[in-house]
Amino acid sequence: MTTQVIDLFCGIGGLTRGLLDAGLHVIAGYDIDPTCKYAYEQNNNIDYHIQNVREITGENLKKLYYNDAIKILVGCAPCQPFSQMRFKLGIANIEDEKYNLLLEYGRLINEVKPTIISMENVPQIRETKIYKNFIRILNKNNYFIDEQVIYCPDYGIPQSRRRFVLVGSKLGPIHIIGPTHNKADVHVRDFIQDLPPIQAGEIDPNDSLHRSAALSEKNLQRIRASTPGRTWRDWPEELRCKCHRKESGQTYSSVYGRMTWEQIGPTITTQFYSYGTGRFGHPEQDRALSLREGALLQTFPPDYDFIDPERPIVFRDIARHIGNAVPVRLGEIIGISIINHLHEHNI
């Protein structure tokens, strides 16, 4: 029996690529961002539909599935409204235009009634009314669900990142597979060490994605004074930022930090290319991570093509695409979990 997947909020295809690697058949991706279209289609050979999820109907999606297919609908709604920082600061997330997109996914589940569904987000989403309403939709439609907070290194992803994953099925109980790696064996070195060295602001002539942001003279002095795994507290007083002298800045020890070869890296965010926004300093070279290094730490294949030859290269757009993506390996774990479940039901 044919299984077919539609990926909502697909971005540049981190989840789609992982599902394909697991062996699932993805037939379409939907997202509102036209700048993601090239990378999604170029690397996955799947149609990318530029459409606001609020305007998509269940009938739109049903027309894409074969009538007799096992329908799988995945949807990783934007996580920014539920981020740990926003929770910490008490920001009124409900005012964010992305806040209720999870319920739009719920609406489409209700209309399409796919056999299997999945979502991924930050762990804090479970504390929201939006999520509780989403679960009510799943319960109303008789889904068996498994929900877990996954520590990425347990699955071979070199980031100190925790993600919430939910899978659901109408066939019966479904389970996310257990850890596949010993987290002590997951190191930054294994993902980015073999790339050619470049300087801050330089581009590798053989890989236009292997480019790093330029650094000011002061930040060059700072990174040269930084030791892998240590903090700005090691710097001479004259290199410290004004914010570090304030009590409120004392807890932000990872900013302006260098990564360590033999450890996992930080969570890759949309600003991973900026030395001053986290522990994004290269372990040896005096610069922040390149775009390619960020993609590799997100477990994208080394040849994943992010640069549309028909558009000017916008550094921040590509970094945003990479930072917002579901790590490819996590997508593969979700896909393997689904395939195992299908095999249990002889599908």
Image: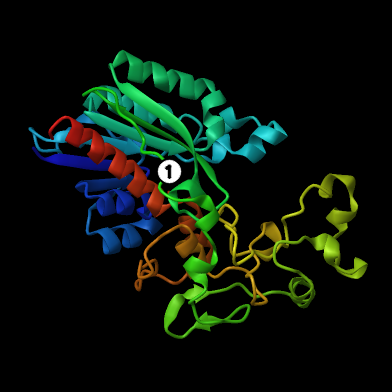
Is 254 situated left or right of 36 in this image? right
Is 197 situated left or right of 16 in this image? right
Q: Secondary structure at mark 1?
A: loop
Q: Quadrant of the N terminus?
A: top left
Judge by depth and name the residue closer to the eye, 208 or 72: 72
Residue 253 rendering spot, x and y as whole percentages: 77, 53
Q: Residue at x 76, y 69 (%)?
A: 226
Which amino acid does the dot numbered 1 rest on? Pro
Judge by depth and name the residue closer to the eye, 288 or 78: 288
Image height of 102 relative to 255, above or below: above
Which residue carries the number 1 mark? 179
Q: Kindly give the residue lying farthest to the bottom in the view shown.
A: 205
Judge by depth and name the residue closer to the eye, 288 or 216: 288
Q: Residue at x 52, y 37 (%)?
A: 122
Q: Residue at x 29, y 43 (%)?
A: 336
Location of residue 347 by image quarter = top left
Q: Residue at x 30, y 39 (%)?
A: 337
